[in-house]
Structure formats: C-alpha cells, structure tokens
Image (cartoon, coloured by chain):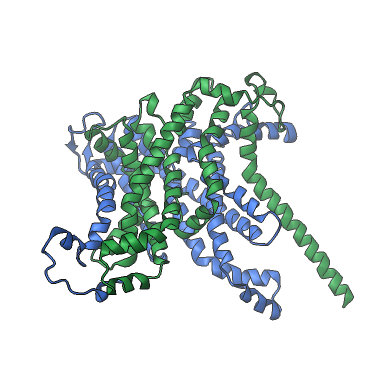
Amino acid sequence: MSLRTKIEPVENPFKTLSQFLLSDKVFPYVLIAGAGTWLGLIYAFPLIQTIQYSFFEVGLLQQSDQTFVGLQNFREVVNGPFVDTISRTIIWTFGSVIPSILLGMFGAILLNREFPGRRWALGIALVPWTMPLAIVGFIWVMMYHSQIGFLTILFEEYFNMSVSFLGFDNALISVIIARIWRATPFAMIIIYARLQSIPDQLYESAKIDGAGRWQQFRYITLPELGRVTAIVLIMLTVWTTLVFDLIWTMTQGGPVSATTIIPIDIYKSVFQSYELGMAAAKSVVTVLMLLVVTIFYWRVSDL
Amino acid sequence: MKKKQLNSDWKHTILNAFTWVALILFLGFIIIPIYNGFLISITPFGRLGERGLLPIAFQWQNYVEVFDAINLERQLLNSTIYAVGITVLNLLVTVPAGYALSRFEFRGRTVFLFTLLLTQMFAAIVIIPALYTLIRSFGILDTYASVILTVGAVTIPLSTFLLKGFFDSLPIEIEEAAMVDGCSRIQILRQIILPVSLPGVLTAATFTFIVGFQNFLIPLIMISDESKLPVTVGIFNMFGELSPPHHLVMAATFIGIAPILLLYVLAQDYIIEGLTEGGAKG
C-alpha cells in the first residue's frame, strides 16, 4: 500500500517548506488537510458543542446566556414525551427499512434476468432515488390528499371506502409507505449489483447437480446476498432514523404528534420552543443509540 | 418422458407469466405516484375536484403559469448555484483526501476513516442545535455561503469514499515506476494521476451535485431571503399557503426535478456504478 519503501532518502527534508510538506511523513496530512479542517469545523466542532449544550439550559436567541443544569435535560428527555418519539421512530424506521429491503431484493431478482427493455426498467426503478426527499413528500401528499388524492379516489370509487390517509390514525403508516417508495430503489440497486457479480458457473454446476430454481436461490443466491443485505440494512436504518425532509413536507410531524419522529422533535425543540439544551440532549441520546449500529457497520464493511 | 417435458414447459410458462406480472406491479408502484403528480400538474385548478384515475384535461399552460406564481427561475438558478458551489469546493478537498486514503498508511488514517463514516451516517440534524448558532456566529446566516459551507461538509464522506474506491482500482505500479525514475510527488499527481482519474472525479461530482441540489433542511433554517431560496424550499413555501394551488405545485415539482432527472439520464452509468461502489445517502 505505502510508497514509503520505494522512496530515495531525501538529504535534508527540512531544507525548504515545500520539501517538508512533500516529505513522506507529512504529505498524507497535506492531502487530507482540506477535508479534515472542513469536517472539523462544520461537523466535529458543532458535535462537541451539542454535547456541551446538553448539560446546559440554552436559549436559541441568546446562547451566551447559559445555565449549567447537569443531567436535568436528560432526565426530562427520558421522562417526557421524547420516549414516545423514540418508540414512534422505531416503528417508522423498521416499518420502512425491512419492507424496502424485501421489495428491493424482489425487484433486484426480477431485473437480474435477461429480458427486452431491462435497462429501461432499471432506469425507471431508480428514479425515486434521484428525487429530493422534500419533493417525494410533495408527490406523496398528492397521493393521499383528502379530496384530490389518487389513493383517496381509488378507494372511494373502486372499494367504496373513505380513508383519511394523513389523519391521526393512518398518518404514520402513510409516511412509512412514502419512505419505502424512496428507499426501495436504493436497496434494489445495491443488491442488484451484488447479484450481477455472482458467477454463472455456480448456477450451471448446481443445475448439473440437479438443483431446482428454488434450491439454486436458497443455496447460492441467498448466502451470496448476506453481507450486502447487512450493509444496506445498517445504512438504511441510520439514514431513515434521521430523515427530516420527507416528514416535514408531508405532515410537519402531525396530526398532533402522530408522525413526530426524532429529527422532527429535535427541529421543533430548536426552532419552535427555542430550547437548545433540550434539543442537544435529544441529539446526544440519538447519536449514542445509532453509534452502536454504526460501529457494527464499521466491522462488517471493509473500510 | 414426453409428459414430463410438457409439464416442465407449462411450469416455465407460468413462472414467466408470474415474473412479468410481478415486474409490472413493481414498476407500477414506482411509477404511479409520479404519474399522479403529473396528471395534477396538467389539470386546470377548477377541475381538480372532478378528476379520476385517468387524465381529464391537458392544460400545459400550468407549466408557464407557475413561473408567474412563484419566482421559479430564480429558485432554479439558486439551486444550481448551491449545487455547483458545493460540488467544486467538495472536489477540491476530496480528490486529495481520497488519494491519500488510497495510497498512504499514516498515523490517524483509521481515525480519519471512522470520522468520515460517522459524518456519512449522521445527517446534519443531530448537530443542528450547535450548527445553527455556529453559522450565526460567523455572521453568514442568510447567505449562499452558509448553505454551501454546511451542505459541502455533508457531502465530503460520500465523495471521499467514492474517490478512494476509484484510486484503489488504479494500479500503483505506474506511480512506483515513476518514483524510481525520479518523478516528484507533484509530477506524479499532475502527469499520472489526474489524467486518468476523470471517470472517478465525474462520478463523485455527479453524486455531490445531486445531494447539493436535493438539500432542504439547511436552506430551510439558514435562508430567509426569498431571492436566495432553492427550489425545494420555494415549492414547500408555496405548498404551505392557505389553499395551495396544487396544479401549480406539481408543475413546479416537475420543473424542479428536471435538472437532476436530466443529469440522471445523461450519467446513469456513472450513477449506478457509484451507488454500488460507495453507497449514497438514500
């Protein structure tokens, strides 16, 4: 990996600045300096400050006016309505991630066979992924709209049922379906790529051994998909937990708090009740929960 | 023997038919919401109430009218400014970073990789409490810089990973030979690496542009000046009106996603390769 061994020793590495910067020890740091500084400023620094805020009572408008409150924010977080937010978020996340993966796998297997127009089908199936989440929100509100929504019309005219899709009882499942629509293409294309890389010989030799279609799927395809499915599962779990745009454009967390998941809750704490300390405590709890998932990802991925 | 053959033929036909039905259902699930939005976008406002599942009118005029209703051309320009600014600045730091991660072992490499992964996983929402006050303390709230600086950072991990993967796929032998021949690091970068890294850079650029164009949360909180809003927030504001003109909202939506759809059609191969290579935010 390293070029170090191949390099002629430089006589005096500190002769000039440029020589110093290009020297073996320093050069990699020069290369990552830009990205490192940028991330440090915009990500690491606010993250540390968010942790700090979580122990203080801080207002949005005068954040210089801070009072140390110890663990009080966390006590309020674990005893307050945020607990409901967490359980709602768990339903939201797994309710959309698992169907997305199953549907994505289903689509990937369908598209993995040769047929005329396959490239077109693949191209169309990926379109939801290219759309901004906010726009996916607009498009799905028009599916659910109580007067002119496609699904409303479909249910009324063909099944004689009047369903209030974005009403209190159904709102969470409705936003989950919109999320499935957006996440399925992502799961599909990654699983599809993995399927394409399974060598044909594996199937050929299984056929010779007399394996049927189901057996080929069960004993060749599924095991090959194991690792990639785990990766998609972890990524979608973390990203879905932190989805803001889709829900904000569809329901803004309502009706009441029926679709208030963690990101909506944090946003409201900051910009509607101006409680930075509480918002920060919610963030810290969320990061700790997702960190476990992320570390697991770190171990399965080959970074 | 013959009967068995026939039986298997039948099975094959049924399986084939099943596959086609399944495929049509799957694509239907993807297409119907887009089709529905499109129908609304070409329906006159007064007739929205009488619509069914098929088109009742083709009022293309809506696509012109929407430019009078909101400042859509300005918002499209803004979204493009954000996306281009983010992409250019992003590539300036991620091309070297991706190269460093691919070619060098250095102390702190693992820490840097893990930081990248963390920032790729954790959307900006978790640091919003302090991020907002930070940007405000810079005094750049409500400027293009606020969005470019923030969303630019968000896109660093993805394009660094994509570029690292790309550089990993380039054989290192050429660089080693050049080193032996006495080429300097700068010469190697300029004359050997840069010329062949165009495909990798284009993939990273495409993804960064799309993420930059898609952004909603950051401009929502940082931009209040109407003339600096991107398309996503602009349409959201129109949607939030008391009785939103749904036909125009949908027309704006389709105009708003046209640039990325076009990019997608043009760069589909890069995108599919990039998705499978690095995994993009979904």
Q: Is residue A125 above or below residue A209?
A: above
Residue A2 horizontal/vertical position (percent): 29, 71
Q: Is residue A163 visible?
A: no
Colour of chain A, in one word, is blue
Disc count in the image? 0
Which residue is painted at 73% across and 31% down in the image? A157
Which residue is painted at 79% across and 60% down in the image? B14
Q: Nearer the viewer, residue A278 or B177?
A: B177
Q: Nearer the viewer, residue B132 or B170?
A: B170
Q: Is residue A65 visible?
A: yes
Give the left or right position of residue B68, taking residue B36 as reference.
Answer: left
Q: Is residue A247 above or below residue A2?
A: above
Which residue is painted at 33% across and 48% down in the image? A285
| Quadrant containing the N terminus of chain A in the rendered view | bottom left
Residue B277 horizontal/vertical position (percent): 47, 60
Quadrant assignment, res A67 = top left
Colour of chain B, in one word, is green
Give the left or right position of residue A107, taking residue A16 as reference.
Answer: right
Residue A226 horizontal/vertical position (percent): 52, 66
| Quadrant containing the C terminus of chain A in the rendered view | bottom left
Residue B282 horizontal/vertical position (percent): 48, 49
Quadrant assignment, res A14 = bottom left
Residue at the outermost right position: B2
Q: Is residue A271 above or below residue A281?
A: above
Q: Nearer the viewer, residue B201 or A88?
A: B201
